[in-house]
Amino acid sequence: MASLKDLRNRIASVKATQKITKAMQMVAAAKLRRAQAAAEAARPYAERMERVLGNIASSITPSPESPKLLVGTGKDDIHLLLVCTSERGLCGAFNSAIVRLAREQIGRLQSQGKTVKIFCVGRKGYDQLRRQYEKQIVETVDLRGVRQLGYENASGIAEKIVARFEAGEFDVVTLFYSHFKSVISQVPTVQQIIPPVIEKKKESSGPSVAYEYEPEEEDILTDLLPRNIATQIFRALLENAASEQGARMTAMDNATRNAGDMIRKQTITYNRTRQAMITKELIEIISGAEAL
Amino acid sequence: MAVFPFELASPARLVFSGEVDQVDCPGAEGDFGVLANHAPLISALRPGILTIRQSGSPKRFFVRDGFAEVSSTGLTVIVEHAVPAEELSSAELAKEIEAAEDKLAAAKDGPSRDRAGERIAQLKQIASQLSGAGAAAH
């Protein structure tokens, strides 16, 4: 049986851990608020972008000369999975959930005989995917040094992807990230970004407006499409940032509560042991006195 | 004067949203003004100054890399970067010009070199416009 001193040490160490998890929870809560505000502020831009793209895409008829970023390469043999995860751990199943989704997709594509390439954003996803798919990872982007996530980060990634796409390295690009639903619920999400999935407008909305284009539609499209990819990636990164903090907050809240439970149990054991010792000493004294 | 809804959105935030009288946009093929009931139009924008006119003094924003969309529901401008013109420092603009010059140096083929060169000229024009306006105000 553990001595009193051992028990005391154990309680002290759990208390220290609890302090750390409590602090991490509060830091995550503060960061979450900022990340959530950033994600919400970026939403109008992404929505307007989607609408403009939808308007243009529905007004042109797909032809072999149409930009490949819009209509695709006509094949779907090589897939690129863009897996966005966080740079830090201790946030529950946040990273594992995204990686699991990506793994499922990889398995499905490979069983169909497709080639899969992986582009990792964030160290955690890279670490997990590296074990199994080291050779398929074409590039990783590390955002650890980034304090405030900016549009430049996303457009940098988008540029790399577009350059590789134009070099004919793959046909379809799919984005993996975690959609921030609420503090306690983050949904791992799959989104195809090349070619973009454009929602068909309902017929009931009447004849689509005839826009005038300045310069030509094609010129606008070649400018707009890479920008749309950057926007989608930017949105995914912001959603991810908010989700990560939300997941960490929940995980640390659980850890704090667990530590509390543990302290309570240990304290009871400690008190019982202490009382047992006192009783034992008393019995020794009394029986010693009786013997005289 | 008839007013119409106008929105200026950048990735960082929705910069402006409200009813306005007139908006002057720096279009890729020349400046254009948008009034209420303008015909549907989608235009690329060049780096430049966007002016919003409404009751009171006009608001000026420096915008770059984006589009303007005029539809029956009003005007929407989506740009990668938008700052009020008075907050735009010449240092920031100089940095932009430098970035554009780097791009020119890195450009391989003709068209991209042309684009980069054009961009430098546009940015320099803004710089001179702003310094001119600043001098006039003093």
Image: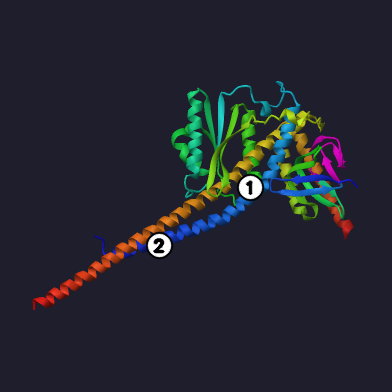
Measure the C-alpha gap from mark 2 to mark 1: 35 Å
Asked if A290 appears above or below A241 in the picture, the reply is below
Residue identified by numbered label 1: A39
Relative to residue A44, is residue A116 drawn left or right? left
**Residue A140 located within the stretch drawn in magenta:** no
Dot 1 falls on a residue whose secondary structure is helix
**Label 1 neighbourhood size at 10 Å, few (<14), some (14-19), many (20+)?**
many
Across and down, in percent, residue A20 comes to 46, 59
In the rendered image, the vertical position of residue A91 relative to residue A273, given as above or below: above
Residue A15's mark?
A: 2
Residue displayed at 74% across by 49% down: B15
State which region is magenta: B22-48
Q: Is residue B129 visible?
A: yes
Rendered-image quadrant of the N terminus of chain A: bottom left
- Percent position of residue A42, x then y: 67, 46
Which residue: 73% across, 28% down? A203
Q: Is residue B29 magenta?
A: yes
Residue at position x 23%, y 71% from top? A278
Chain ID at mark 2: A
Q: Quadrant of the C terminus of chain A?
A: bottom left
